[in-house]
Amino acid sequence: MKLAEVFARAIGRDAPLEFRAFDGSTAGDPGAPARIVVRSPLAMSHLASAPGELGLARAYVSGSLDIDGDMYAALASMSSATLEGVPAKVRLEIAARLGAYRLWWPTRRPAAESRLRGRRHSKARDQEAITYHYDVSNRFYSWILGPSMAYTCAVYPEADSSLEEAQWTKHDLVARKLGLRPEMRLLDVGCGWGGMVIHAARHYGVRALGVTLSRKQAEWGQKAIAEAGLSELAEIRHLDYRDVRESGFDAVSSIGLTEHIGKARLGEYFRFLHDKLRPGGRLLNHCITRSDNAQPAKVGGFLNRYVFPDGELESPGHLVSAMHDNGLEVRHEENLREHYSRTLTEWCANLDAHWPEAVREVGLDRARVWRLYMAGSRLGFERNNVQLHQILGVRLDGADARMPLRPDW
Ligand SMILES: C[S@@+](CC[C@H](N)C(=O)[O-])C[C@H]1O[C@@H](n2cnc3c(N)ncnc32)[C@H](O)[C@@H]1O
């Protein structure tokens, strides 16, 4: 059986995809928005060794399989692939073919795959994990993220708002939820390239300290603060949040950091942030959560090995409980899932628009990792496999929460 026949049976003959393989076989619609090209038997060996997303990712990142055109459309079609309706005899034949590929074309893990050592979530290993993903190239990130350099879900105020407006709106939403006012002190943990710190200082006159484990982000953010003339108010340090010594902050923001903490450490994370606040101070926690809480968290897949090593997602309920159990009165929460699929759609389009220079900057294998992960994440938010929750908590400890009677955020 030729590979195109296997493909047509698994994906369906009407899928909006074209398929070509090294054995000369073809299937699908040549005018489709996306084309899968299996360039060598090595791709089949990758798929046989690690069936599903990891095998596909290894084949794509190693260059033995290409996905041309619309990556999102390709993933949307492939994610529903199944051999369920295929007769048992044919399935056995396919399994035997895959086994033979595996035997004759042994695979090696592509060099881009992460290999972290040491105790999970030790400071040293977390530094390695963050360097792996964020210290790639600031230029590369600027092509994807645009001028805001914000690497988290934007908040679109209108149907036709731009990414830049939506990132501004996200920072402003966080500022308003935190009740920022001039002379307040804000701690932004996991500050990235400094977007929230700069927004709080520029628009609210707040004294803002941001910390990030990425050296390249810190350098970029420090320069951006100086160029904006905000050095009196804003500061960014290359520092593990656990090493922040100051306390008594009026507000803490954590935008996209929780995904790096790990379930086992969530309690101490929220306790630490609680202790950084003065009584009456607020924490706004913004992070990706997972929808299916019944399944154990998935480790060792594509995202863990190529994108966010040691990253872990929790359910929104678990986060609310962890905040509640660590001294924070939970006052508000909202799910911004649709905003993240839209944000990712724009990042994917930006990467495609800068593809040749992105490949020159970080190499083809890495550029492919980002292309695959961002399109897959867009699909994940659209299909409610993952969500984005903002949760607002207050440290009471005898103080008044001073929340508005009906917030108009
Ligand atoms: C997805 S990025 C979000 C950046 C930024 N908040 C934004 O919205 O663009 C996650 C950030 O968490 C930071 N981070 C992860 N673990 C950290 C830790 N232990 N201490 C400080 N920063 C950390 C990373 O360096 C990165 O800046």
Image: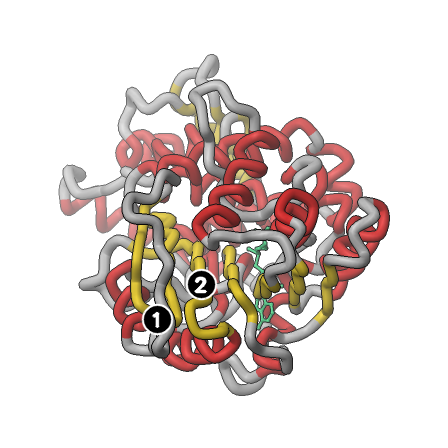
Please tell me which of labels 1 and 2 falls first in the chain: 2
Quarter of the image holding residue 14?
top left
Q: Which residue is mark 1?
A: 328
Q: Quadrant of the C terminus?
A: top left
Compared with 233, 227 (above or below) is above
The secondary structure type at the circle numbered 1 is strand
Residue 304 tag number:
none
How far across and down, in percent of the image, does residue 28 sit? Answer: 38, 21
The residue carrying pointer 1 sits among few (fewer than 14), some (14 to 19) or many (20 or more) residues within 10 Å by Cα, namely: many
Quarter of the image holding residue 69?
top right
Residue visible at 53% across and 33% down in the picture:
166
The secondary structure type at the circle numbered 2 is strand
How far across and down, in percent of the image, does residue 251 sit? Answer: 52, 63
Amino acid on which the number 1 mark rests in the picture: Leu
The quarter of the image that holds ligand 1 is bottom right
Residue visible at 41% across and 74% down in the picture:
270
Dots 1, 2 in contact, CB < 8 A: yes
Q: Which residue is mark 2?
A: 283
Q: CA distance from mark 1 to mark 2?
A: 8 Å
Compared with 15, 63 (above or below) is below
- In front of the other: 16 or 185: 185
Q: Is residue 352 visible?
A: yes
Q: Is residue 113 visible?
A: no
Farthest bottom residue? 119
Render colour scheme: secondary structure
Amino acid on which the number 2 mark rests in the picture: Leu
Q: Quadrant of the N terminus?
A: top left
How far across and down, in percent of the image, does residue 171 sit? Answer: 55, 44
- In front of the other: 5 or 355: 355
